[in-house]
Image (cartoon, helix red, strand yellow):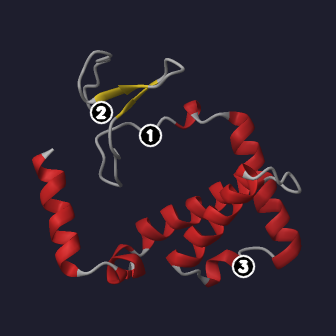
């Protein structure tokens, strides 16, 4: 397990206006040195995600999502659900539906890392510039 120290005053830590802290940028990956702390996943959020899975099971059958989705479809549906929530639509649990799309996207990133259609949408020069700017920060 990685040696993790609480560094509240670190320039790499962002303190939100609510007082919560998080690492700046996106941290972790499948070969991350951070521990997987399943016990820290909020139970209510996990329940809502499970209910969304149950809704999908009743509508489409068990494991329908395993037939595959394009990354862009998952992101488009996620953003559509977040937009509906942000504009006041409470007709369904849009937050949980958006999270479901992100969970499936994370699954695809782990199981099919070479099959990223999103990488193919970004010109090679932009990817190189992005990698260079990440290394400089």
Asked if labels 1 and 3 touch by Cβ distance under 8 angstroms, the answer is no
Q: Viewer-nearest of labels 2 and 3?
A: 3
Which of disc 3 and disc 2 is earlier in sequence?
2
Between the residue at mark 1 and the residue at mark 2, the CA separation in whole angstroms equals: 10 Å
Quadrant holding the N terminus: top left
**Mark 3 surroundings within 10 Å by alpha-carbon count, few (fewer than 14), some (14 through 19), many (20 or more):** few
Q: Which residue is mark 2?
A: 1
Q: Secondary structure at mark 3?
A: helix
In the depicted structure, whether residue 87 falls above or below residue 68: above
Left or right of 69 in this view: 12: left
Q: Quadrant of residue 59?
A: bottom right
Q: Position of residue 68 (x, y in %)?
A: 59, 82
Left or right of 56 in this view: 124: left
Q: Nearer the viewer, residue 47 or 121?
A: 121
Q: Secondary structure at mark 1?
A: loop
Q: Which residue is mark 1?
A: 36
**Mark 1 surroundings within 10 Å by alpha-carbon count, few (fewer than 14), some (14 through 19), many (20 or more):** few
């Amino acid at each position: 397990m990685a040696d993790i120290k609480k560094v509240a005053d670190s320039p790499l830590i962002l303190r939100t206006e609510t007082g919560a802290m998080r690492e700046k940028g996106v941290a972790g990956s499948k070969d991350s040195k951070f521990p997987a702390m399943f016990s820290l996943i909020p139970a209510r959020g996990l329940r809502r995600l499970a209910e969304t899975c149950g809704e999908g099971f009743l509508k489409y059958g068990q494991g329908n999502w395993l037939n595959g989705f394009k990354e862009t479809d998952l992101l488009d549906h996620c953003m559509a659900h977040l937009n509906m929530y942000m504009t006041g639509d409470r007709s369904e649990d849009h937050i949980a539906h958006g999270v479901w799309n992100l969970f499936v996207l994370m699954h695809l990133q782990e199981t099919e890392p070479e099959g990223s259609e999103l990488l193919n949408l970004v010109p090679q020069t932009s990817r190189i510039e992005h990698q260079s700017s990440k290394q400089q920060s």
